[in-house]
Amino acid sequence: MKRARACVLRVGGTNCDEEIKVALEELGLRTDVVHMDWLEKGDVHKYQLLVFPGGFSYGDYVRAGAVWGKRVVSKIRRDLERFIESGRLVMGICNGFQVLVESGALPGGDGAFSETPKAVLANNSSARYECRWTYLRCENGSTPFTSKIPVGEVLKIPVGHGEGRFIVESEELLRELIKENRVTFRYALPSGKAAEGAYPFNPNGSEYDIAAICNKEGNVMGMMPHPERAFFGWQAVGYGGPEGAGDGRRIFESIIEHIEGL
Amino acid sequence: MKEGLVRSICKDPPILAADLREAADKDLVEISSAMGLALSLQEMKAIQGHFGRPLTDVELQTFGQTWSEHCIHKTFRGEIQTEGGVVNSLLKSYIARATMELSKPWCFSVFEDNAGLVEFDEGHVIAAKVETHNHPSAIEPFGGAATGVGGVIRDILGVWGEPIALSDVLCFGPLDIDYSELAPGIKHPRYIFNGVVAGVGNYGNNMGIPNVSGAVLFDRNYAGNVVVYCGCFGILPKSGYVKDTKDGDLAILVGGRTGRDGIHGVTFASTDLPEESEGLRSAVQIPNPLVEERLRRAVIRIRDEGLATGITDLGGGGISCATGEMANRSKLGLTVELDAVILKEPDLAPWEIWVSESQERMLLSAPERNLGRITEIFREEELESCVLGRFNKTGRIRACFKGATVCDLDLDFLYNPPRTTRRASRASAVRKPLILEKPKDLKVELLRVLSDPNIRSREEIVRTYDHEVRGVTVVKPLQGFEGGHNDAAVLKPLRGSWMGVVISCGITPFYPDPYWMAGCSLEEALRNNVAVGGRRIAILDNFVWGNPEKEDRMGSLLRACEACYHFAKAFETPFISGKDSLYNESPMGPVRPTLLITGVGIIPDVRRAVTMELKRAEDPVYLIGVTKEELCGSAYLRVKGVEGGAWPEVDAASSKSLMDALTKAIDAGHVAACHDLSEGGAGVAAAEMVLGSCLGMELDFRQMIHETTRSDFVLFSESQGRFLVEVREDQEEEFKKVFKGLPARRMGRVLGERKLEITDLEGGKISVDLEELAYAWRGISWN
């Protein structure tokens, strides 16, 4: 059993917490699934990794992740700021990515949070839910989430969302994200070349084929694809064979290597 | 109606009372209709004869709900008069009889509870249930379909199961039908289609339960009668299955609030759809998956802590049916305090609270000492709950409201309604000769069949359903990046075990003879299951039929049930659960008799599961089974607009030995890919394997074992019991040994290039490249 501990947060409507716990535990990490309303002040500091999982938080009736994002700000922002500033890791997957964006933690501001959201995950350009496998090109192999994945390598990981089209506030911010190497994964063609918006390889019409980004320090990452659904080889039958590992496992392995060193 | 028969006995709350003692037959019929009870004269007379006092509206509504076709299945349990004598209960004589006679030790609980339960491994059972939601979906497609999914998920929660997968089978009218061809009051199939697909996707995605299996059918007949089947599958530890409500236990209602939505859902589902159906919108419930997601968590936590003694969902009939059933099951009684029920809006009449079908509600029974902990769990999961009352030994269901007793009924009488009698005429299809000119170009015929709405890719629909959530889907509805359609889904529900659940379906309503139609549906469900590696299959039946009070509808239902018995016995696959939806009639006529069979199998090791994707160039391709000249009702003839010839029949003995051999070959690792032959026959199956792969296929139909006379017939015959198999080249000899003495023949090989090459019976060559196949099948150019 590893020293580090992970917390998978949930609220009503979260539904991908269990499989993330399975993935983390499989790698020896003690993992608690905790309802955000049960968190007492300071509780998060018991952990080295916080995960915001996928689902439809609060029904996502407003805009995906918007309600949970605002509740994060009003309830645990102080704790989360300290958590992030101490260099621990926060990861958002799918709805969790939407929550981090809506709360201002991604792309982030001068501090851990921007006061208003600087980006949005808008409805897919196909105007419908898309459940499909995607090719992801690693763009930055030196974050704590990607240290075991060389730049240019292509991972096969599925998406499942209706709102995943990443749009940023301004051209400048997009250029900044690219320049600062904060786009960690892009949707790609099987060859590894960027999808350049081509459907279905870019499944949602994201700007610059963005599938995942991180904050300035690299310790907060959000991604639309679900690495926990490509953790075991058998989840990806037909892509890599039933034995062995799925491509998503390497993201979790990178994370664990990092937090064990904290 | 005679004056004074129905009168108000209380203004606040509003309560009516009906004195049936003085009522003439026509008054009884009128009361049933005016109160929306949908009870027959015979049933009204039974109530009249039983009570020496006036009945409240709450009590009469209780009978309307409990004795409805939807709740008590009176046609399936009733007596049927036929030319050949009397059939005493379709359920007992056919469906459940097969299960009883097979008496499989792995059947854990069948036909008793909200869902059927079969053993999975030593410590766990699988729960399975399939429902229909046709009438609601015809009126309000999104809400109707979504609450269909929500309802069947609660059936799994209602046996303490953790839901792990969903399925949906949908039948629509042609999407391009002209408005002028629709009867007044019928909504356009495109509108229904969009709403139903969105509703099914929305509820499942929000709940985070993968939708892994299904089918979509189009036919003019379904324009007036949309068919929506929703299935849910779950898993639970054997020790978690607790149904033992005790005297003194509390009845706890939890989940969504109770409102005026879904009033009379069951009675409306138990009659034909009238032209003015729009006014029935209030009978359709409103979905809120967010509440059900919390319910799921709470129910599983309560199960794991062992806090409750019983559970059931609130579906048809609302509180009236759920409380009555729970009390009756344990031979107890219950007094319900209707004041305790948390309402969506004030001023509901007591009978409305009693029968409302508002969604996302469950009923639990638990000893009082556990109430504190249970309520705490509900609070933590942000759920509202209330105590309805306490179970007692009276054997009576009572309801009180504002101090007055508004219902007081003997459960014994309530749950033993008068037997319904139906009449059935003899129903078999008459065979007509097949008159069809030989086609000039087989390639054109193949592309036409591939582009038919009933054959073409379902990707546009399936991608909007999350089939990967929970991370346990091994064989997916869409295979690989190419999106080929697998025959069945395989899930790996337990962390520490390689064992898998295999889910498949069979539905063949286009074969005209009801007996063989049912046989083929059953065989197709098994064939699909076996094709991916499933075995030890349990099956579920869902009949969608017209008005059973009409002799011809009843006749075909009887024949279909006979087939269910015969083939379930022959294949040794017990029925574990079922649900019938009758009265599917609209101003456009009765629904085409439609039987869905769902198969739930297991596979010892999911790593052995087989997909339909071709794996390696040069591997040999075998066709298993015999091709007969069976084209009546086939996709080929329907595309041509031709009827006639023989319809497919099922040779159970031969089919079973082929399936057993295939399972053996899969377990031994000889099979690289497999696809069953169904709609569109060998031609379509081969094309689908190429479409779902990065490779191609070459087949010589002169090698086929067949009893036909023409190339288009061998290509498109829909004979049952057949598979196309890619055999691992280095294991071909072993594979042949497994199939020694059985009809299995090498037809060709896998090609490195993505194309389909066919040699027909006369030696003519057809070559279809991927672009042509994809254009026809997907309706778009691909890659």
Image (tube, coloured by chain):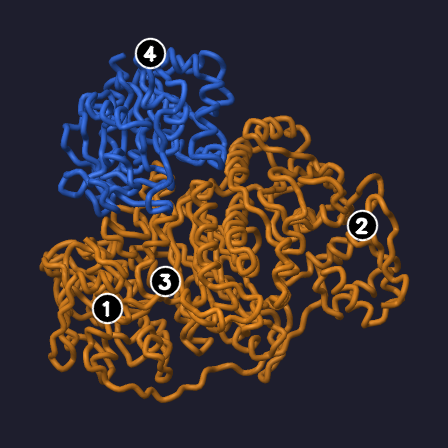
Chain colours: A blue, B orange
Give the number of callouts: 4
State the residue in front, A19 or A39. Answer: A39
Q: Which mark is residue B526?
A: 3
Q: Work out how far the residue at label 4 is from the one at label 3, CA to CA, in angstroms.
A: 58 Å
Residue B187 drawn above or below residue B150: below
Q: Which mark is residue B408?
A: 2
Answer with left or right where residue B157 lies relative to residue A66: right
Sequence-first tag of 1 and 2:
2
Q: Residues within 10 Å of mark 1 (few under 14, many from 20)?
A: many
State the residue in front, B425 or A135. Answer: A135
Answer with left or right where residue A2 lies relative to residue B124: left
Q: Work out how far the residue at label 4 is from the one at label 2, CA to CA, in angstroms.
A: 66 Å
Image mark 3: chain: B
Q: Work out how far the residue at label 3 is from the one at label 1, CA to CA, in angstroms.
A: 15 Å
Q: Are marks 1 and 2 in contact (CB under 8 Å)?
A: no
The residue labelled by disc 1 is B624
Residue type beneath disc 3? Leu
Q: Is residue B507 visible?
A: no
The residue labelled by disc 4 is A85
Image mark 4: chain: A
